[in-house]
Image (tube, helix red, strand yellow):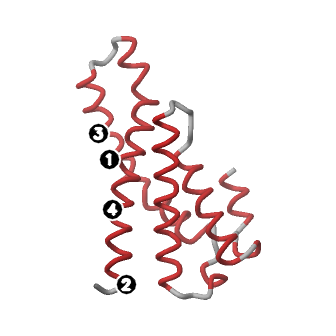
């Protein structure tokens, strides 16, 4: 199997795992009060969450993805090797998903956005050094 196929397969699986963790974390935070108070049934909360989580990803996900993909780390500072970038970003996705899974399981309040942003900053620091991170964008995110 070609290395690019392996990376793509692992990235797809990590992406599904991350989506599952985002759903588990964010839906619980957003719908817990509504279900607990009786304003929504569990079934109603699942339907509302599915509609709005999907809608948010489709309507606003592109600009968020662009910021994560090329705003935080200067990809040229990483040497421009697409395989390094693909493997690094896949590792970021997997690391953030694992952290979300652990934190959600333990009931810790955690931000999905902070998880992925932190992973990408860590990747940038390790792969390209301090200057590879766009600290102005990080200031805007913060």
- Seen from this angle, which residue lies furthest top? 37
First reached walking from the N terminus: tag 1 or tag 4: 4
Question: Which quarter shows the N terminus?
Answer: bottom left
- Where is residue 58 drawn, in percent x and y? 35, 54
* Camera-side residue of 88 and 49: 88
* Disc 4 from disc 3: Cα separation: 20 Å
Evaluate if marks 4 and 2 touch, with contact meaning CB atoms under 8 Å apart.
Answer: no
**Residue at numbered disc 3:** 50
Q: In the rendering, which numbered label is found on residue 63?
A: none
Q: Is residue 123 left or right of residue 88?
A: right
Is the residue under label 2 in contact with that under label 1 (CB below 8 Å)?
no
SS state under label 4? helix
Q: Give whichever of discs 4 and 2 has the lower sequence position.
A: 2
Is disc 3 surrounded by few (<14), some (14 to 19) or many (20+) residues within 10 Å?
some
**Drawn side of residue 36 relative to residue 139, left or right:** left
Q: Residue at x 32, y 47 (%)?
A: 54
Residue denoted by label 1: 54
Q: Earlier in the sequence, mark 2 or mark 3?
A: 2
Residue 89, image x, y percentages: 50, 69
Instruction: Measure how far apart labels 1 and 2 are at the Cα level.
Output: 31 Å
> Contact, CB < 8 Å: mark 2 with mark 3?
no
Image point (44%, 37%), residue name: 26
User: Which residue has dot 2 on it?
Assistant: 3
Q: Is residue 139 left or right of residue 61?
A: right
Residue named by callout 4: 13
Foreground tag (4 vs 3): 4
Kindly report the distance in space between the C-alpha atoms of the residues bearing marks 1 and 4.
19 Å
The earlier-in-sequence mark between 4 and 3 is: 4
Q: Give the Cα distance between marks 1 and 3.
A: 6 Å
Residues at discs 1 and 3 in contact (Cβ within 8 Å): yes
Q: How many neighbours does mark 1 have within 10 angstroms: few (below 14), some (14-19), or many (20 or more)?
A: few
């Amino acid at each position: 199997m070609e290395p690019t196929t392996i990376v793509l397969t692992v990235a797809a699986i990590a992406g599904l795992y991350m989506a599952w963790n985002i759903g588990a974390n964010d839906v619980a935070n957003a719908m817990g009060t509504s279900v607990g108070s009786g304003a929504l049934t569990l079934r109603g909360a699942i339907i509302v969450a599915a509609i709005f989580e999907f809608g948010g990803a489709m309507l606003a996900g592109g600009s968020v993805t662009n910021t994560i993909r090329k705003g935080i780390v200067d990809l040229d500072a990483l040497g421009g090797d697409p395989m390094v970038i693909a493997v690094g970003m896949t590792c970021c996705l997997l690391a953030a998903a694992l952290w979300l899974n652990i934190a959600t399981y333990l009931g810790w309040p955690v931000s999905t956005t902070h998880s992925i942003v932190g992973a990408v900053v860590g990747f940038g620091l390790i792969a390209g050094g301090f200057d590879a991170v766009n600290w102005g964008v990080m200031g805007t995110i913060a």
